Image: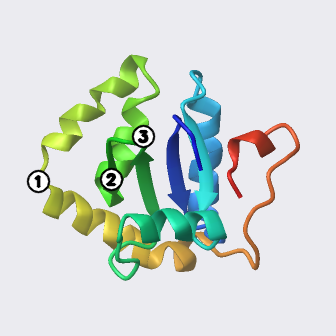
Amino acid sequence: MNTTKKIILFDGVCNLCNNAIQFIIKHDKKDQFRFATLQGEIGQKFISERNIDQQKTDSIILIEPSVAYYLKSTAALKIGRNFGSIWHLLWILEQIPVSFRDWIYSYIAKNRYKWFGKKDNCMIPTPELKSKFLD
């Protein structure tokens, strides 16, 4: 897979995650991101290549090709900062210790199916959005 775009891996059956992806697409004015589900073959390949322990993260991963990857709250904050304008102020939240941010993030992730629901299958992008999805 040869892409210079930032890649977001997400839980394709989670309603909260799917809504977050729709939000990201709406605010990604510079077309910086591509998406793949954690459950899909491509998502699994990215996880395997980076030796990411899926037992420790099962919700969102941001991959910046040839740079790094980010998990949990750090991934979410870095994604938001890419939107530009006022969103750049999210760097302030990055000053909060990662352990505390990730504790909150993990609490929400642990309860996301109960609070927001779960789909039987991964979302199917519309024809207009299909080019943004890797799988």
In front of the other: 117 or 55: 55
Position of residue 132 in the picture relative to residue 104 (left or right)? right
Q: In which quarter of the image is residue 78?
A: top left
Which residue sits furthest right? 127
Q: Residue 97 carries which label?
A: 1
Going from N to C along the chain, the mark reached first, 1 or 2, is 2
Q: Position of residue 8 (x, y in %)?
A: 51, 51
**Mark 3 Cα within 10 Å, few/some/many (few <14, many 20+)?**
many
Where does the image place residue 54, in percent across and percent down from the top left?
A: 41, 77
Q: In this view, does 48 lie to the left or right of 106?
A: right
State the residue position of label 3: 79
Which residue is located at x 34 percent, y 43 percent?
77
> Which residue, given by chain and number where applicable, does mark 2 sit on?
70
- Measured in 3D between alpha carbons, the distance from the residue under mark 1 to the one under mark 2, in whole angstroms, is 15 Å
Task: Work out whether mark 3 precedes mark 1 in sequence or the reverse, and give the earlier one.
Answer: 3
Q: Is residue 111 above or below residue 24?
A: below
- At label 1, the amino acid type is Pro
In the foreground, 15 or 56: 56
Under circle 2, the secondary element is: strand
